[in-house]
Amino acid sequence: MFFVAPPIFGGRGTSLINEIKNEGLESGLKLCLDAGDINSWPGSGQLWKDLSGNGNHFYLGGGSGADGADPTFNGTPGGLSQNEYFSVAGGDYFTLAQANPQWVKDLFRVGSASFFVMLRIPTDANLHIFATEDGTTTHYGGSMKYASDFGKSEGFVFVNSGGSSGYGVLGVGIDAPTFPGLYGLAIATTIASNGDWQVAGSVNDSSGGPPGPPSAGTVPDTHDPTQTAKIFANGNASQTAASGARIYCLAVWQGVAIDPDASAHMFSMMRNRFGL
C-alpha cells in the first residue's frame, strides 16, 4: 500500500509504535524508529532508539561518536507532529549500532519482509531507505530504496544482490511523483526460492495511475552481507541520500508480510500527524 500527498501542515498525532500495537502487528516486528517519540529520540546523544523492544538502535552517522555524517534532528523532542524529523545535508546517514543480527542477514533472502516509512524525497535520485548492499555483485545483502534508475513504473524497489545471483528487483509503481514530496510507504514483500517476487496490497498515488508489476528476479543470494545495515545510505555508505531528504519514522518486519488492510488503517490513524 502506497500513499502520497503534498506537504501541508499537520497536527499532533500518535507514535508509530502505538499504532503498530493497536493494529496487532507486533509479530515479526524487528525495528521501530520514530523521530517524534521522545522514547526513540530523547533530544541528545548518538542513538536513534528502537521502540520494538529488540534493542536495534541506530547511530547517527558512522559510529558512537559525533562525526560529519550525523543527520540533523528538527523540531521538538516528543512533539509527535510533522515538524519532528531527521534531515540530511548530503553524505549523512544512520548506522546500526551492532553487528548485523540474524534478522538483518535474512531480510533480503527467501521469505517475507515488510516496511512502513514516512519520508521526504527531495529530488528524483536514488535513496536507500534500509540497506546492507554496496551496489556491486561482489558484496552481499540488499536494499529497500527509491530507485530513479529503475523508472517510474517501479519507483520503490527491494533489491537482493551479491555473488553469482546478481540482482533480483521487486518494483512498486508510482506514476508522476512530485519532488520534493512527502511519502508514506507500507509494503509487504515475499521472495520465493525460484526468485519470484510478490507484493501484498496495491499501489496508489496522487495521479491515480496504475502500479508497475513486480519484476522476476534471479534466485536470491544466501551469503551474509559484509556491510553493516544503514538508513539513508547503502552498506558501505558510498551512496547517500540527497540533501534535503527527511525521515520521520520507520518500522521493519522480517518473516512477516503485514496485512495491507491493517497497514492502510495504521496509516489512516497517523495521517493527522503529517497533515495528509
Image (cartoon, rainbow, N blue to C red):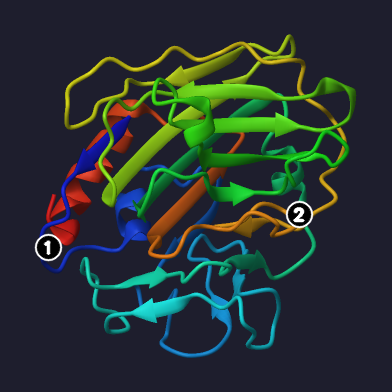
The quadrant of the rendering that contains the N terminus is: top left
Q: Which of 34 and 156 is in front in this view?
A: 156
Q: Position of residue 205 (x, y in %)?
A: 23, 30
Label 2 crowd bin: few (<14), some (14–19), many (20+), radius 10 Å: few
262 left or right of 193 in image: left
Task: Tell me the kind of residue under disc 2.
Answer: Pro
Secondary structure type for disc 1:
loop
Give whichever of discs 1 and 2 has the lower sequence position: 1
Residue appearing at x 14%, y 69% in the figure: 12
Nearest the eye: 169 or 221: 169
Quarter of the image where one finds residue 109: top right
Q: Residue at position x 32%, y 83% from top?
A: 77
148 with respect to 234 (left or right)? left
Secondary structure of the residue carrying numbered label 2? loop
Q: Is residue 29 among what the camera can see?
A: yes
> Which residue is found at the position 40% from the left and 43% from the top?
124
Q: Position of residue 125 (x, y in %)?
A: 47, 45
Q: Percent position (x, y) of residue 134?
A: 75, 47
Q: Position of residue 121 (x, y in %)?
A: 37, 51
Q: Can residue 35 be seen in this view?
A: no
Residue denoted by label 1: 10
Q: Name the residue under label 2.
A: 101
